[in-house]
Amino acid sequence: MEDPVTTYKFLGMHFCFEETHPVITEDVRITTEDASVIKELAKQLAEYAADPVNDVRKELWKKVNGLRGEKPMIWYDEVCWHEMNQEDELILITEHPLCRIIETELKRQIYQWKYMPGDMVIEPVVYAPLAVFNTGIGLEKEMEIVKTDIQNDVVSRHFIITIKDECDIEKIKYPEIIHDYDLSNVIYNRYQELFDGILTVRKRGAPGFWFAPWDDIVMYTGVQEALLDLVLHPEYVKHFIEKLVDVGLRVLDQYEEQNILSSNNYNIRVGSGAYGYTDELPRFETGKDTIPARKLWGCCTAQIFSEVSPAMHEEFALQYERKWLERFGLTYYGCCEPLHHKVEHLRAIQNLRKISISPYADLAAAKDAIGDDYVISYKPSPAVLANKEWDPSAVKADLKKHLSVIRDCNVEVIMKDISTVRYQPRRLWEWVKIASEVSLELSG
C-alpha cells in the first residue's frame, strides 16, 4: 500500500507554488480496529504530554526565540525514518489512509520521546488539517531521478530545463487556493471521534509557508544557467524572481481572505529551524479567530546563492524577498547557504529574528556579525551520522568545540538533512543525548 504521508500535502508545511493532490475524500469511514489503534497511541502521547518537563522546555524555547537564551536548544528534523525502525515500533497497522497518516505522526512522536527527546515538546493537542488545495502555477518540474536506496525519500534529481527566456516566464499562472469547507468539517469530526477525551482536537490551516523562489528558479532553468544569467541576462532574472514573489504574495492574500492560516507559535517548525514558541506573537485557534500573516512567523531562503556575493544576493534575492517577509510578524532567513558574511544585508529585514548558520558557514564570523541581535540557527553537518565508523567521543569533542564559539549567543542546534544513519538508529539517539549534555555543560 502506498504511504499517503508522502502525497497528502495539506497536513504539513504549505508551499506557494506546488499543486496539491490530496488522497483523502469524504469517504472517511473508520473501522473499529483502526480507531482502537489510534486511541491507544493517543493515550500514550497524552501521558508524555502531561510530563512537566514540557513546560520547562517550552519556556526555554520562548527565551531563546526572545533573545534571552539560557542554553543552546537541541532539536532535529528531516530524519531518515525508513532506517529508524526499532522492534517494529514504526510499522503501520491501520488501513484507512487518514488513519495511516495519523498513526505515522503519533508513532514518530512517541519514538522521538522515548529514544531521542532533546528539547522536544509534546502538547496535549492534535491538529485536524483543513482541506486546502492549490491549483499550482501551471508548470511541471521535469526531472530524472537516481536512487541509491529504494526505501529512502532522499534522491538525486537532474532537472530538465523548461524556462529559457522572458516568454517562458509568462507561462506562469497565478494559483487558486480552494478550501473545501465540507471536507474540512468531515475530517475534523473524524478527529473528534478518534481523540475526544484523550487529546484536544483543533483545526489547522497553513501554519506558515516554505518560501524559496530561488529553489524553483533553478529547477526550471538549471543551476549553472541561472547563475550565469545573473551576469548575462540580469533583467530576465529580475523579471523571473519578481514574478514568483508576486505569485507568492497573491497566494498569501488568498489564505488571509479565506482565513485559513494557522498560528505557528508553538511546537512546530519555523523555516529550516526549530520551534516557533514566542511571547511576541499571539496564539490563535483556526476557525474561531481571524489570523493574519502579520501574527505569524515567515521564512525565506536562496540556497543556490551560496557562491554569490553579498551585493548580488541583495540585488537578485533580498530586495524581492523582503516584500514577502515584511508581511509577517517575525521571520527566519536561510537554509543551507552560508550567511556569515551577509548579515549586514540581512539586517535590512526589519522583522528578522533567526538566521540559519549552515555547516558551510564560518561559525566565528557568524558570531561576530550576529552577536545577540538574532537567534543563531546552527546546523551541524549530518555527515557525522553517515560515516563508516561511529565515534561518540569525537562527536562530543566536535560539538563542544563548535558550540563553545557561540556559547554566549542565542542558539538553537538543529541536526537536519539526515539522509542516512547506516541503518543504525542509535547513532541519532546518541547524537541527541551528546548534544543535550554538551548544551548543559556549556550553560552551567
Image: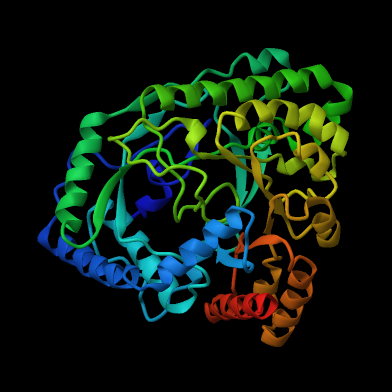
Viewed as shown, does residue 309 lie left or right of 401? right
Query: At 42% from the left edge and 38% from the top edge, which residue is drawn?
Result: 206
Q: Nearer the viewer, residue 112 or 1?
A: 112
Q: Nearer the viewer, residue 157 or 180?
A: 180
Point out the residue furthest to the left here. Answer: 32
Q: Quadrant of residue 288?
A: top left
Viewed as shown, does residue 94 lie left or right of 367? left
Q: How many marks?
A: 0
Is 241 above or below relative to 329?
A: above
Tell me residue 318's x, y (percent). Answer: 74, 32
Is 428 above or below relative to 302?
A: below
Query: At 32% from the left edge and 28% from the top edge, which residue is drawn?
Result: 179
* Residue 343 in sight: yes
Viewed as shown, does residue 257 lie left or right of 16? left
| Quadrant that contains the N terminus | bottom left
Viewed as shown, does residue 137 lie left or right of 156? left
* Residue 151 in sight: no
Query: At 58% from the left edge and 79% from the top edge, which residue is drawn?
Result: 427
| Quadrant that contains the C terminus | bottom right
Tell me residue 149's x, y (percent). Answer: 56, 64
Q: Nearer the viewer, residue 441 or 182?
A: 441
Is 315 above or below relative to 97?
A: above
Tell me residue 424's x, y (percent). Answer: 55, 79
